[in-house]
Image: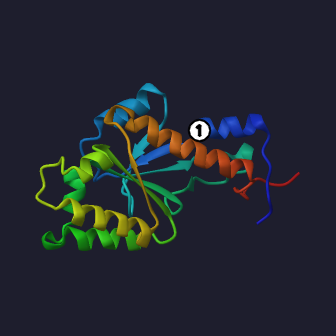
């Protein structure tokens, strides 16, 4: 695939046009969708194979994009509302851990950002959550998953989650455009 360079104007046009995909199974995310609307960031709801959010560039023949370019196999965001939801995913005895592991395996080489809305490391180590999961077991499981599955963990306040998601995709795409990654624009 040939390296392709876009002008700044073309990059700006593409960066304004990307559309966020929210997984159909994602729940209690109205605050995120409202944030997208407020920022005039397009989004759709569609089933994702893994993760809760990803994005795509819609077809744009004038910029050499003959069909929608989906990035769900490159970058996804997995959102957890709080540490208790995370505990539910990592506990060994409830079957959710196996489902969570399977999701990590399905992602393959895709980068997954796990974002937790309520809580932080201080809350985790201090046991400031309702679950009976011990702080040592939770920290150990979480850190092991980070290393084993190349999981990128962030704690982001609930009122900033929509912004965080949109900015993450914006700067990922911006970096790819600057390095000529698309490979779909006809060279002149």
**Is 48 placed left or right of 92 in the picture?**
right
Residue 175 in the image, given as x and y percentages of width and height: 66, 48
Residue 13 in the image, given as x and y percentages of width and height: 67, 36
Q: Is residue 80 above or below residue 16?
A: below
Give the residue at the far top of this rendering: 38
Query: Who's the residue at 52% across and 39% down the image?
Result: 167
Residue 30 in the image, given as x and y percentages of width and height: 29, 35
Residue 72 in the image, given as x and y percentages of width and height: 49, 58
Give the residue at the far right of this rendering: 188
Please tell me in which quadrant of the rendered image residue 134 appears: bottom left
Residue 59 seen in render: no
**Is 110 placed left or right of 177 in the picture?**
left
What residue is pinned by disc 1?
17
Q: Is residue 159 above or below residue 5?
A: above
Please tell me in which quadrant of the rendered image residue 96 appears: bottom left
Query: Who's the residue at 18% across and 46% down the image?
Result: 128
Q: Is residue 161 above or below residue 93?
A: above
Query: SS for tag 1?
Result: helix
Question: From the image, which quarter does the N terminus lie in?
Answer: bottom right
Residue 170 seen in render: yes
Nearer to me, 73 or 132: 132
Nearer to me, 81 or 188: 81
- How are the colours assigned in the image? rainbow
Q: Residues within 10 Å of mark 1 (few under 14, many from 20)?
A: some
Figure label count: 1
Q: Is residue 41 above or below residue 172?
A: above
Nearer to me, 6 or 67: 6
Query: Who's the residue at 45% across and 55% down the image?
Result: 76
Query: Who's the residue at 43% across and 25% down the image?
Result: 38
């Amino acid at each position: 695939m040939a390296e392709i360079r876009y002008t700044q104007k073309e990059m700006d046009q593409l960066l304004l046009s990307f559309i966020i995909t929210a997984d159909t199974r994602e729940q209690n995310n109205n605050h995120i969708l409202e944030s997208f609307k407020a920022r005039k960031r397009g989004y759709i709801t569609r089933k994702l194979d893994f993760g809760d959010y990803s994005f795509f560039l819609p077809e744009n023949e004038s910029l050499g994009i003959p069909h929608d370019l989906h990035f769900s196999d490159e970058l996804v965001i997995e959102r957890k509302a709080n540490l208790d939801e995370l505990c539910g995913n990592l506990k060994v005895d409830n079957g959710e851990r196996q489902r969570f592991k399977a999701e990590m395996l399905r992602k393959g080489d895709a980068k997954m950002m796990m974002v937790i809305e309520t809580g932080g490391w201080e809350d985790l180590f201090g046991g400031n959550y309702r679950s009976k999961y011990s702080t040592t077991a939770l920290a150990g499981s979480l850190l092991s998953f980070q290393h084993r599955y190349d999981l990128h963990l962030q704690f982001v306040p609930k009122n900033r989650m929509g912004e965080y998601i949109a900015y993450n995709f914006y700067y990922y795409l911006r970096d790819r455009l600057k390095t000529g990654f698309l490979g779909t624009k006809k060279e002149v």
